[in-house]
Image (cartoon, grey):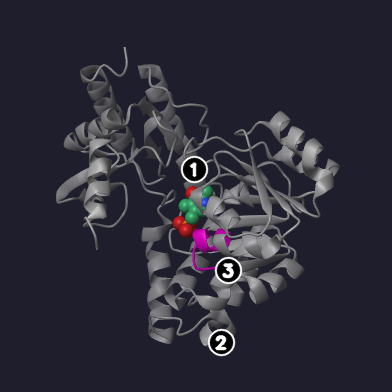
Amino acid sequence: MINNIFDDKVNQLKKDGLYKDIPVIFSKCQNRITINGQQNVINLSSNNYLGLGQHPLVIDAAKKALDQFGVGAGAVRPIVGNNVLIGELEDLIARFKNEEAVTLFQSGLTANLGTIPAITDKGDLILSDALNHASIIDGIRLSKADKKVYKHSDMNDLEHLLKDHRASYNQVLIITDGVFSMDGDIADLPSIVNLAKTYQCMTYVDDAHGSGVLGRNGRGTIDHFGLHGQVDFIMGTLSKAIGVVGGYIASKKSVKEWLLNRARPILFSTAVPPSSLAAIKRSIELLELDQTRVNQLHYNTNLLRTGLIEMGYDVLKSTTPIIPVIIGDEILTAQVSKSLLDRGVFVSPIVFPTVPPSTGRLRIMVSATLTKEDIDEALNVFKDIGDQLKLIN
Ligand SMILES: *Cc1c(COP(=O)(O)O)cnc(C)c1O
């Protein structure tokens, strides 16, 4: 390689405060973790919203499947990787979500990367919210359709684009996060569904952060708004609140048949391991039976959010367990995160390019597993650091 170009690139990242030193976790990913050797740290950054990833019954289910099927799926689904548990799981999720059919993928990311290009074509248009997740953006890049971005949750802007461009395209797909992963706000799905009806468009909701969090027993953002049957493609992840790994698309049955034949992650990447399938199944069954964990999650979210707002922190318009604590400057954001960790609280700093420049933030991800003691202690530390670094007044 000429000139060590990557040394220069990495050095520039460090200079700009954008270099990430990825922390190492030595414990279960739960309310208290051992991170970089530091013990008993309060974890405010896990997507394991409900603690299901460490639930003894979920672990038992995985162990049983390990004994029965071994560790790997052995092939892609269309060859011999389509373990009987996949179909059972898809049916379970479809019933849980109140949708006609579900197609399983290896992750939320591959669900987006595989589905968006499979359901759109040349002559189509994709309209995408400005704050959509990276996996949507990359899925759109893989599509042959044209794309336009509307201002974040701005329904006037979306309607403008529809008025100006609908007639020039075959199909138009409106695509949005259900819960926005960086700001924690909820998409205006009722308006999006209405616009889609008026302008004859298809709708696609990435519900990675709504699944297991919003709606009855965590059925998601569509359930939260009572919009069953009115969104064409609902992507969900099994890696976050469900606590394991995987993603899916809930849709009409014909869409499932199309994806099984056309979505490239299904055709060209090995299926989810059977132990994970069994764990996911158990996890969803627990969720279906019992709303307590979801209630606890919202209780904890409320304690943390109101505590931070009372201190004077800016948490944007978040109403979900994603609480962005806005700091601004990238280098200061990293410094605040480090000061918190020195005091035993881990909150991941999120900076450009994940979020726009100068909107650096500590993104709190609340979990139902946090105790009152964890939350009080975390808030105390936020107060001390905020005073010290003059972030609050
Ligand atoms: C995490 C996330 C994904 C990816 O899900 P994985 O299962 O982790 O691959 C997709 N979309 C959004 C909005 C996410 O937050």
Q: Nearer the viewer, residue 104 or 310?
A: 104
Of all residues shown, which one is farthest toward the bottom? 80
Secondary structure under tag 1 reads loop
**Which type of secondary structure does the marked residue at label 2 adopt?**
helix
Q: Quadrant of residue 251?
A: bottom right
Q: Position of residue 200 (x, y in %)?
A: 83, 48
Residue at the location (29% across, 37% down)? 374
Asked if labels 3 and 1 touch by Cβ distance under 8 angstroms, the answer is no
The answer to whether the residue labelled 3 contacts the one labelled 2, judged by CB atoms less than 8 Å apart, is no
- Label of residue 104 in the image: 3
Q: Which residues are magenta?
A: 104-112
Identify the residue shown where x is 20% and y is 32%: 339
Question: Between disc 3 and disc 2, whose residue precedes?
Answer: 2
Measuring from the top left, give residue 43's x and y in whole percent.
30, 44
Q: How many marks?
A: 3
Query: Of callouts 2 and 1, which one flags the residue occurring earlier in the amino acid sequence?
Result: 2
Q: What residue is shown with label 2?
A: 79
User: Which residue is label 1 attached to?
Assistant: 181
**Neighbourhood count class around disc 1 (C-alpha, 10 Å): few under 14, some 14–19, many 20 upward:** many
Separation of disc 3 and disc 2 at Cα? 15 Å
Callout 2, which amino acid?
Ile
Q: Is residue 161 part of the magenta span, yes or no?
A: no
Asked whether residue 208 appears in the rendered view, the answer is no
Residue under the point 54% across and 68% down: 105
- Ligand 1 within 8 A of label 1's CB? yes
State the SS at label 3.
Answer: strand
Three-letter code for the amino acid on which mark 3 is drawn: Leu
Of residues 381 and 159, the one nearer the viewer is 159
